[in-house]
Image (cartoon, rainbow, N blue to C red):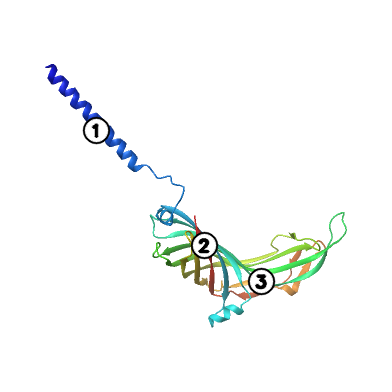
Amino acid sequence: MNTTRALFLTCALAAVNLSSLGQAAKTTDTQPDHNPTETKADILLLDKWRHVGFHLISDWQGGEVDSVLDDPTFGFALTYMKHDRHGLLDGGFDIGFQPMGGFDTTAFVVQDGKAPLEGQLRVRNQLVHAHYLLRFTLFQRAKIQPFAEGFVGARGSLLGARFTAHGSDDFTPVNDVPFFSANFSYGYALGARVQMGERSFLTARYGEMRHLDGGNVVQVADADRLTIGPDGTVTSNATTGVTLPPYSVRVGLAVNF
């Protein structure tokens, strides 16, 4: 009986030890690697990562693509997207602005209790947009990654003014947006991003923007009918209707993090 009991205890202890060793090995295998040096594959295989792009943009009414280079509405756009490998689409937003004309003039700004301050007053009409977008990207591990986007949001114009005193490099906004006009817009875009570095990309994109009936016309402050107050504030007295260009092209740089 003692021999049987000793054999049973020995087998039980062996089973417990084997179970502990197996559990330890499993824990070791599933322990995440905390290597601070992340490779390109590590970034692409993460469940979630973010994408930020900074682009030079230009809109045009149509015709030859070469005419874009003659269009004065060059501007900038910022795109932010969140990527989730569990879904087919990446969501984010896109904002941008483009100068639509304006003027610079010398102005004397009267400040309370101070002598008049002479400087340069810069007045600009801006074409602006803010869109929510969804992107579908092909070949996400390839050197060249084509994508398609759908977007919806607002597009319009605003007037801005700022004053820079002579002898100073700092500028002061002389008032908030004195005029703003925007309409609902939506559209689609096709493009591609080319991998330049471990996390950096060169991005090119062509888009077409649409509006509701008549929504492609916005009011823009008439630069010849503005009033400049003694404190440098700018007031819009008249506007003109401008048909927004339906086509847009952009090129820029983007990074993943």
Q: CA distance from mark 1 to mark 2?
A: 52 Å
- The residue that label 3 is drawn on is 220
Apparent side of residue 32 relative to residue 229 in the rendered image (left or right) = left
Residue type at tag 2: Ala
Quadrant in the rendering for residue 138:
bottom left
Residue type at tag 1: Leu
- The residue that label 1 is drawn on is 18
The mark that comes first in sequence, 1 or 3, is: 1
> In the rendering, at what x and y percent does residue 179 appear?
68, 65
The mark that comes first in sequence, 3 or 2, is: 3
> Looking at the image, is mark 1 or mark 3 nearer the viewer?
1
Q: CA distance from mark 3 to mark 2?
A: 32 Å
> In the rendering, at what x and y percent does residue 94 appear?
54, 62
Name the residue nearer the viewer: 174 or 147.
Answer: 147
Name the residue nearer the viewer: 153 or 239.
Answer: 153
Please tell me which residue is depicted at 81% across the width and 64% down the height of the picture: 119
Residue type at tag 3: Val
Quadrant in the rendering for residue 163:
bottom right
> In the rendering, at what x and y percent does residue 129 appear?
58, 65
Q: Is residue 21 visible?
A: yes
Apparent side of residue 137 relative to residue 237 in the rendered image (left or right) = left
Name the residue nearer the viewer: 166 or 81.
Answer: 166
In the image, residue 186 above or below residue 31: below
- Crowding at dot 3, Cα within 10 Å, few <14 / some 14-19 / many 20+, comes out as many
- The residue that label 2 is drawn on is 254
